[in-house]
Amino acid sequence: MAKWADYCISEVRYSTEHTHIVKVKVCPDLGDTLGNTAEWTRLEVVNSIGQGNSFVTIYKNADGKFNKGEDVRVIVVNGTKYIRTDSNSRAADNLGNLPEF
């Protein structure tokens, strides 16, 4: 497996309004394998991207292996930073259809 990014996000927990991410499950991309999964806050992901780290979403396929999803980026709307996999300027976080925990 080629390295996809510095970190991979596999699951997400949204606020009750489903507009802000509370936490995500993140694992380092080690190239041939993925490192141990940890829970990160949205702010930790935003800060890490701001420091130059890259993130992608990942999805388990039918064989139980991970496939690369979309690149994760920070979008600023009205002075608030959101993490998204699209370029939509809506004031909400959006990491696609990741499983929720």
Image (spheres, rainbow, N blue to C red):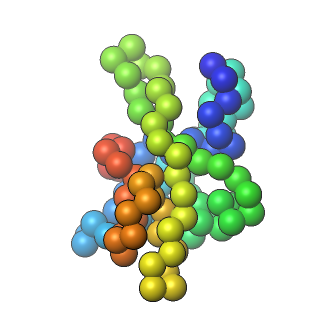
Which is more toward the observer, 21 or 91?
91
Residue found at the far left of this picture: 17
- Whether residue 40 sits left or right of residue 12 in the image: it is right
Residue found at the far bottom of this picture: 78
- Image coordinates of residue 94 in percent, x first then y, are 37, 58
Q: In which quarter of the image is residue 13?
A: bottom left
The reply to whether residue 52 is visible in this rendering is yes
Residue found at the far top of this picture: 63
Which is more toward the observer, 10 or 83?
83
- Image coordinates of residue 101 in percent, x first then y, are 35, 50
- Whether residue 5 sits left or right of residue 25 in the image: it is right
The reply to whether residue 42 is visible in this rendering is no
- Please tell me whether residue 98 is drawn above or below residue 80 in the rendered image: above
- Image coordinates of residue 17 in percent, x first then y, are 25, 72
Q: In which quarter of the image is residue 62?
A: top left
Residue at the image position 36 percent from the left and 75 percent from the top? 91
Residue at the image position 45 percent from the left and 78 percent from the top? 77
- Please tell me whether residue 20 is drawn above or below residue 98 in the rendered image: below
Residue at the image position 63 percent from the left and 19 percent from the top? 1
- Image coordinates of residue 22 in percent, x first then y, are 43, 66
- Please tell me whether residue 83 is drawn above or below residue 36 in the rendered image: below
- Please tell me whether residue 30 is drawn above or below residue 93 in the rendered image: above
Q: How many labels sit on residues?
A: 0
- Whether residue 96 sits left or right of residue 37 in the image: it is left
Residue at the image position 44 percent from the left and 52 percent from the top? 85
